[in-house]
């Protein structure tokens, strides 16, 4: 008879994600993981094999939630371009008090881990996924006549992705909520200027 796992995998992954997000991969020790997950070393290794595997699972969890949030905004808006503008404006609500960091966990990891590593490849794949999602929305906007014929949706997707991750970094240092709102509004308005006149 197989033994039932004596831990809550979802809760453990959430705890690991928040810890890695706050401290980074290299600075997180096994002792840190023991305390955050409330598990003994043997149990952590039995459940997740090693620190790298646990970190990848935590990265996947973070990236899936980020993608789901963006997809929700895109799918619920009246137009793809309006959705992306709304997403940029909504980033003014980033609050460092309700999460380990306003900076993107993917970008923080990208800056921390060297090229050619398995973790780096996981991060790059997730960033590519976000860019594809933006690109798909912009191709749809172009097909709907929201963007001019000479607009390159793939290039614009790169630009908007840069805005999104840049705003997450800016939120880490900005203490004036009004300035943050104005910055988000400026970038959203800039994207709006690309809209074709009806």
Image (cartoon, rainbow, N blue to C red):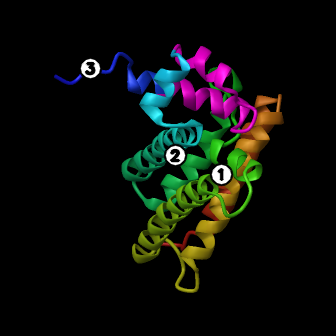
Is 24 included in the stretch rendered in magenta?
yes
Count neighbours of disc 3 (C-alpha within 10 A) and say few if under 14, some if 14 to 19, many if 20 or more: few
**Region in magenta:** 13-38
Judge depth for marks 1 and 2 and give the one in front: 2
Sequence-wise, the earlier of marks 3 and 2 is 3
What is the CA distance from the residue labelled 1 to the residue labelled 3?
42 Å
> What secondary structure characterizes most of the magenta part?
helix
Sequence-wise, the earlier of marks 1 and 2 is 2
The residue that appears at 56% across and 69% down in the rendered structure is 195
Question: Nearest the camera: 121 or 117?
Answer: 117
Q: In this view, does 171 lie to the left or right of 8?
A: right
SS at mark 2 in the image: helix
The residue that appears at 45% across and 60% down in the rendered structure is 80
Question: Nearest the camera: 197 or 31?
Answer: 31
**Residue 59 at what x, y percent from top left?**
55, 43
Judge depth for marks 3 and 2 and give the one in front: 3
Residue to which mark 1 is pinned: 164
**Residue 46 at what x, y percent from top left?**
43, 29
Q: Circles 1 and 3: CB distance less than 8 Å?
A: no
Residue lying farthest left? 1
Q: Residue 4: which numbered mark, if any? A: 3
SS at mark 3 in the image: loop
Count neighbours of disc 2 (C-alpha within 10 A) and say few if under 14, some if 14 to 19, many if 20 or more: many
Judge depth for marks 1 and 3 and give the one in front: 3
């Amino acid at each position: 008879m197989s033994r039932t796992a004596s831990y809550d995998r979802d809760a453990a992954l959430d705890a690991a994600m928040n810890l890695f997000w706050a401290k980074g991969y290299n600075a997180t020790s096994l002792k840190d993981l023991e305390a955050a997950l409330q598990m003994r070393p043997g149990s952590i290794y039995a459940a997740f094999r090693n620190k790298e595997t646990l970190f990848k699972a935590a990265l996947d969890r973070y990236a899936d939630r980020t993608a789901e949030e963006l997809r929700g905004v895109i799918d619920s808006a009246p137009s793809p371009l309006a959705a992306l503008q709304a997403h940029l404006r909504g980033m003014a609500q980033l609050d460092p008090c309700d999460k380990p960091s306003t900076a993107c966990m993917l970008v923080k990891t990208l800056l921390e881990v060297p090229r050619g590593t398995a973790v780096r490849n996981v991060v790059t794949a997730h960033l590519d996924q976000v860019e594809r999602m933006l690109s798909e929305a912009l191709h749809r906007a172009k097909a709907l006549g929201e963007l001019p014929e000479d607009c390159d949706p793939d290039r614009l997707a790169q630009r908007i992705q840069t805005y999104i991750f840049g705003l997450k970094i800016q939120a880490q240092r900005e203490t004036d909520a009004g300035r943050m709102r104005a910055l988000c509004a400026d970038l959203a308005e800039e994207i709006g200027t690309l809209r074709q006149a009806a």
